[in-house]
Amino acid sequence: MHYSPPPMHIPDGFLSLTISILCWILSAAVIGLAISKTNKSLGEKQIPLMGVMAAFIFAAQMINFPVAGGTSGHLLGGALAAIVLGPWAGMLVMTAVIATQALLFQDGGLVVMGANLLNMGLATAAVGYGLYRSTARQSKSVKLGVIGVAAWLSVMTGALLTALELWLSGVSDLKVVVPAMLGVHALIGLGEALITVSAVAFILQTRPDLLAEGSESAKGSGAWVYVGGLIALAVVVLSPLASADPDGLNRVAMDLGFIDTAQSASGPLAGYTVPFLASASASKIVAGAIGALVVGAVAFLIGRGIKAKSQA
Amino acid sequence: MHFDAFDRYHAQESFVHRLDPRVKTALTIAFILSNALLPDGAWLAYGLAWLSLLTANYASRLGLGYTFKRSLIALPFALIAVTILFSMPGRPIFSFHLFFWPLTITDAGLLRFVSILIRSWLSVQAAILLVATTRFPDLVHALEHLKVPAILTTIIAFLYRYLFVLMDEVFRLLRARESRSAAGAGRRSGGGVFWRAKVAGNLAGQLFLRSYERSDRIYNAMVARGYAGRLCTLNPHELKSSDYFVAAFALLLIGILQAIGRF
């Protein structure tokens, strides 16, 4: 069986360490929240359910349909997972899917996994569920229409985040990477929207109870409408801005210390002073401290090794 | 479908296979972190990092071709970084026209582009080595020891366990679609793109329902066998003296790599 990776997984090496760590912190915070929320509301029964649902998303990504010229559309699943399982459980399921893709298939890196989780799992679920939740009292056709828009926007959100992370890492040019990522994913998002809409329509027709009042799907709080709406709005506003005024965003990123002003001025090594630690002496102190830490850890491990050997 | 059709574990009797999964996982992450920290153009450090990978590869008896073939997976992503070839200010080394578009490759851009590719390639190889020498359930168990929340590792363990079952389900659905998609000679089967997308969506919905109902059965069966909310394992991981020594040696090596790369 051929496994074809969806095109949004960032491999290790393509993001700067600062951005990788920031994304990890953000993702870990959201996932931690999701865990505490699901632990509160779900029984032990839900854990096998979420596991099988994670396998479902993974397997559903293999269902494709021919578009034209040998290309095919397929599912990423963030919005669908959040809509059918509820937002928090959907996020955990997507986290498991993305982690497995990175661990088992090297599809997406390990140190940059925080970014991949944020782009493809957490943001997509928030946008997808938020917009869907806003249609709680609407008719079926309105619901399905909004789901389509939500699924499309969820893919665009992931694409924009990916583009911004690559740009902030100094790996790609803002005025190229944003239009390129958004352009490609505008089409991929269309496939996502079509599959998500008809999958939900199918479930509404055959098992309406799974999405009805009182189901896990409907239990997400109304605040999701604002969260999802805000992210969607940010994407809609930021996308044309990033394409039309890259210099403005560049300036903001420099002011915030993400992009080193020296990066473009004094050659290859400039991008590698640790941000927030601009002066050379501070960087040296940090390097020295890390060195001391490594030596200490090595000594500790050798000590434990000798102890384990004498006990064996 | 056979359960290991997706599995990247490469059964072999070797020193690296016998190392504790926790040590292997932690060292892989440390190695990838170290790669991310190496500056552009630290050729000597890259070379030594690759040499240590080759040594680990040799010790694991996987064969060179094994990791090499799989290490190319991240290559398509390099496309995204191509623009820095032209956009980094520096001494121009090569100019050409793409259609009507004048492009100039600069030395700084080339240096950064090649460095990104090498760092990424080294990292991917380390990850491949990890999964090729560690059984996936052991890997998940190691993650649990490394403080990944139990709910996530349990979901991942279930995902791995049932992925193969659900893939079979997908193949059944796709085969059923194929067998009903006949067409007369010279005529296209099925409707337009939207119709085809709708069918694919229906299949996804159907797969969801089958998975959902199956998870009910799975849970009942697990309860029948005494499941109480926690997965148990028969092989508790225990760190041997060799695990400590390897960890110490590898950490030292990473420290040296960093020192060489930076000074």
Image (cartoon, coloured by chain):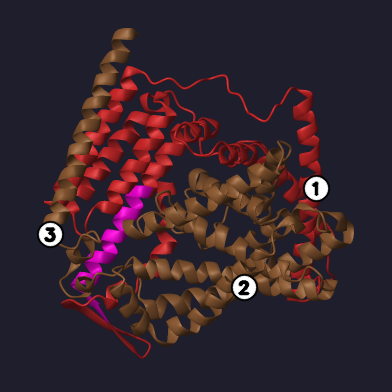
Q: Tell me if mark 3 has few (under 14), some (14-19) or many (20+) residues whose alpha carbon lies within 10 angstroms of its own.
A: few
Give the residues drawn in magenta, as a range: B104-123
- Residue A47 versus residue B115 in the image, above or below: above
- Residue A187, given in percent of the width and then of the height, sits at 60, 75
* Residue A303 quadrant: top left
Q: Mark 2: which secondary structure?
A: helix
Mark 3 belongs to which subunit?
A
Q: Mark 1 points at which residue?
A: B210
Residue B243 on the magenta span:
no
Mark 1 belongs to which subunit?
B
Marks 1 and 2 close (CB-CB < 8 Å): no
Mark 2 belongs to which subunit?
A
Marks 3 and 2 close (CB-CB < 8 Å): no
Please tell me if label 1 and label 2 are on a single chain.
Answer: no
* CA–CA distance in space, label 3 to label 2: 43 Å
For the point 65% across and 47% down, the residue is A54
- Residue A219, given in percent of the width and then of the height, sits at 74, 56
> For the C terminus of chain A, which image quadrant?
top left
| Marks 1, 2: nearer the viewer | 2
Q: Name the residue under label 2.
A: A229
Spot the brown chain and give its letter.
A
* Three-letter code for the amino acid on which mark 3 is drawn: Ala
